[in-house]
Every structure is written in structure tokens, then in C-alpha cells.
Image (cartoon, helix red, strand yellow):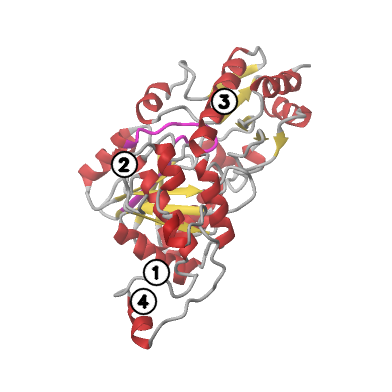
């Protein structure tokens, strides 16, 4: 199979083959891990041409690498975008993109619920350099409309949102923003869904970012990120946000591990979704649980929107216990099979307390404003036998 995208092939097929032709590498079934910091030129003219961009080819692994190029082509294919850039972390992907596209005086309009480190970078980082950070409820079109200005250059949101599982209508939000000003870029964090479940670029978004640490890698053994967009934007991020601003360069070994993970992405996501649905159904009926946040539940306020833009409902669940913070701590400390750990998308079921862990960068007041309660528990449904996960949760909830 050639490196060119062939969307006639199924997602699972492209997850295995897109962007790589074994015939180009002496028949190697898997892409070689190219461990070289620099690349030799045949002559001065070739070196100059590669540095200027007039000639294709690698010259320094801070910019590109043959192993990395396979991953980037595959990710672009799966997200149905033109090009991609792999980075050393999800935050590397986010920061390299925002440093590239924003300047002092610009407004960045952000949904009110985002990952803690994303929030911290925007609120406590970018703002120091003259970027106006404005938060809105992206489930409320009127709130978005009221906060768009002539200075708005980019909007940013997650769906489902980390950690409380709010689902944002990608098509509706991007259409509203583009009607106001078609030059505003719409950026979506697709970490929770991956392209196996949701493809924001096909719904009107301009840029997609991932923490590839999570479901794309899938095994909890690497840190990485990715950006997918049009080719011109990716080239700008590569040559400015990555090369000059952040240096968030991905290691070739991590690229190889992500490529290996992506080969089973669709299979793993199917199991994550199945397990999460069964867990959510159980929790929804449990007498000690006040509320379950999972778009696969028919009583979830975001069920309809999720049904329209997602192929399945994902592997992430959030819940509130009737006993609040104390009950949440008791549950987390009693679990035996599920691991008390941050991150998500691993083979293991992971549980954590967002207010004191992943979203502790918010102040108490900010958490209240952004819908992150003190009693919220987040579950990343793993690949274990679901009856074992449920049994562990039941014993954790028992008095």
C-alpha cells in the first residue's frame, strides 16, 4: 500500500498500513526506528535546498525524522486531515500550536472545562504574554456569541471534556464561529475519542490535538502528543512552535510505540467503550451514586449530541457520590483492581480525583466556576474483564 491516503479502505486497515510501504525499507514489516540526530547531504546544494524547504528530505531530527514521518502520515489519514505533527507530549502539541498562532492582543476563546495543565498554560502562561484568555460555556451558543470579538483568533475546546464529560456540538460551534468570522481557527482536543470514535475536522474544526500518551499509545509506556491540520498550518507549527519555541521533539522509539499502539486502536476502543457502558449502567443504578456522567446513558444530557458526532461513547466515565468528597476518597482508597493513577486510555482501569490531582492547577473558586466539583471521580475503563471491574467498584462502594 502506498503512503497516499485511500479513504476507501476501512479505518482498521488504515490504522495498520497508512503511510508505510515495506518495499521502501528492504521489506521490513514494521517501520525502522531511525536513531539519528542529523542527516548527511550529498552536496551543499542539497543541504541548502532542504533547509529552505525547496527540496524534501530530513536534515535534523528536531524538525523531522523518517520514523516520525510515518506516524504523521498515518495520523493525518485517520483524522482525515492534510498533515500532522508528532510532539514529545500532549502539552507540547498544544503549546507549540498556540505559540505559533497567537500574538499579543489576540483573544483565545476557551470552553469553561479543559484539562488542568491546558488551563494553567492558558490562564497563567499565555495571558502573561498579552494574549486575552476568555472562557465561555460552549454548550450555550448565546454565551459564545456574546464573547466573540474582532480580536478573537482561535477557539479551543475538548469533547467530551476532561473531567466532567460535557459534550460540545462540534458542527454547531464551528459553524457559529465561522459565520462570525471565517478566519477564526477552531481547535479541538480529541484525546478522549481518538479518530476511531470522532473526527472533528470532518465536522468543521481546523485543528485537532491529541495526548498520544493516552489511547493512541494505549499501553501507558510513553509520553507524546500530536497536531493534525492543513499542511500550511502544520508546517508553521513545525518550523516555529516546535523548532524555535518549545523544542518538544518526540523520540523515535516513542514514535514506534505509538505506531504499534495504533494498529490495535479500533479493537481497543471497542472494548473500552463496551466496558465503560457496562460500568456506567451499574453506577447509574447504585443507591450511593448521585450522578453518573457518561454520554452512553440515555438520561445523560449530552446523549443526543454524542450519538450524532461520535461512533461510540468512549471509555471515560465521571461520577458524583451522594456522600460528596469524603465518599469519593473512601471509594478511591478501597479499590483493589483499579489503579489510583492519573492519565487514561491504558489497558488497566485507572481512577483519580480531579480536584486534587489532574485539575489541581485550578483554584477552589475556579473549579467551582468551571464545573469541577470536590466530589467528582474520574474512571478510565480498562481492558480487563468487565465483571471484575464492576466487582471492584461494588466492593469499593460497599459500607
Picture disc at residue 7:
2
Query: Counting residues from the N terminus, which is met first, the one under dot 2 or under dot 4?
Result: 2
Residue 165: percent from left, percent from top: 50, 31
Who's the residue at 50% across and 43% down the image?
263
Query: Counting residues from the N terminus, which is met first, the one under dot 2 or under dot 3?
Result: 2
Question: Which element type, helix, strand or loop, lies under badge 3?
Answer: helix
Quarter of the image where the C terminus is located: top right
Q: Nearer the viewer, mark 2 or mark 3?
A: 2
Pointer 1 local density, CA inside 10 Å: few below 14, some 14–19, many at least 20: some
Who's the residue at 29% across and 46% down the image?
148
Question: What residue is disc 1 on?
Answer: 239
Question: What residue is disc 4 on?
Answer: 50
Query: Counting residues from the N terminus, which is met first, the one under dot 4 or under dot 1?
Result: 4
Query: Counting residues from the N terminus, which is met first, the one under dot 1 or under dot 3?
Result: 1
In space, the residues marked 2 and 3 are separated at their CA atoms by: 29 Å
> Main SS of the magenta segment?
loop
Question: Which element type, helix, strand or loop, lies under badge 4?
Answer: helix
Give the number of marks: 4
Q: Is residue 356 above or below residue 295?
A: below
Q: Is residue 204 left or right of residue 118?
A: left
Amino acid at each position: 500500500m502506498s503512503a497516499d491516503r485511500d479513504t476507501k479502505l476501512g479505518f482498521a486497515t488504515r490504522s495498520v498500513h497508512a503511510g508505510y510501504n515495506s518495499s521502501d525499507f528492504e521489506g521490513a514489516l514494521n517501520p525502522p526506528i531511525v536513531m539519528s540526530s542529523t542527516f548527511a547531504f550529498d552536496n551543499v546544494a542539497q543541504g541548502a535546498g532542504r533547509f529552505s524547504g525547496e527540496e524534501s528530505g530530513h536534515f535534523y531530527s528536531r524538525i523531522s525524522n523518517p520514523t516520525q514521518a510515518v506516524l504523521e502520515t498515518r495520523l493525518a489519514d485517520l483524522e482525515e486531515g492534510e498533515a500532522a505533527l508528532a510532539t514529545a507530549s500532549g502539552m507540547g502539541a498544544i503549546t507549540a500550536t498556540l505559540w505559533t498562532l497567537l500574538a499579543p492582543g489576540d483573544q483565545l476563546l476557551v470552553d469553561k472545562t479543559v484539562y488542568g495543565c491546558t488551563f494553567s498554560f492558558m490562564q497563567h502562561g499565555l495571558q502573561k504574554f498579552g494574549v486575552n484568555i476568555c472562557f465561555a460555556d460552549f454548550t450555550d451558543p448565546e454565551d459564545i456569541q456574546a464573547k466573540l470579538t474582532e480580536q478573537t483568533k482561535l477557539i479551543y475546546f475538548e469533547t467530551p471534556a476532561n473531567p466532567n464529560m460535557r459534550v460540545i456540538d462540534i458542527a454547531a460551534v464551528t459553524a457559529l464561529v465561522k459565520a462570525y468570522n471565517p478566519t477564526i481557527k477552531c481547535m479541538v482536543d480529541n484525546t478522549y475519542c481518538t479518530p476511531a470514535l470522532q473526527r472533528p475536522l470532518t465536522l468543521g474544526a481546523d485543528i485537532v490535538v491529541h495526548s498520544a500518551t493516552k489511547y493512541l499509545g494505549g499501553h501507558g509506556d510513553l509520553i507524546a502528543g500530536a497536531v493534525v491540520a492543513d499542511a500550511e498550518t502544520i508546517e508553521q507549527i513545525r518550523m516555529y512552535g516546535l523548532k524555535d519555541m518549545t523544542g518538544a521533539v518526540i523520540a523515535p522509539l516513542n514514535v514506534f510505540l505509538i505506531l504499534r499502539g495504533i494498529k490495535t486502536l479500533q479493537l481497543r476502543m471497542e472494548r473500552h467503550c463496551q466496558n465503560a457502558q457496562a460500568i456506567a449502567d451499574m453506577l447509574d443504578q447504585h443507591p450511593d451514586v448521585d450522578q453518573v456522567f457518561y454520554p452512553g446513558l440515555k438520561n445523560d444530557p449530552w446523549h443526543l449530541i454524542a450519538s450524532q458526532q461520535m461512533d461510540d461513547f468512549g471509555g471515560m466515565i465521571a461520577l458524583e457520590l451522594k456522600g460528596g468528597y469524603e465518599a469519593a476518597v473512601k471509594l478511591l482508597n478501597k479499590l483493589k483492581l483499579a489503579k489510583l493513577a492519573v492519565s487514561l486510555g491504558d489497558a488497566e482501569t485507572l481512577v483519580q480525583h480531579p480536584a486534587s490531582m489532574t485539575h489541581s492547577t485550578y483554584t477552589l473558586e475556579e473549579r467551582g466556576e468551571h464545573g469541577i466539583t470536590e466530589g467528582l471521580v474520574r474512571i478510565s475503563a480498562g481492558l480487563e474483564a468487565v465483571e471484575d471491574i464492576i466487582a471492584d467498584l461494588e466492593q469499593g462502594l460497599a459500607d
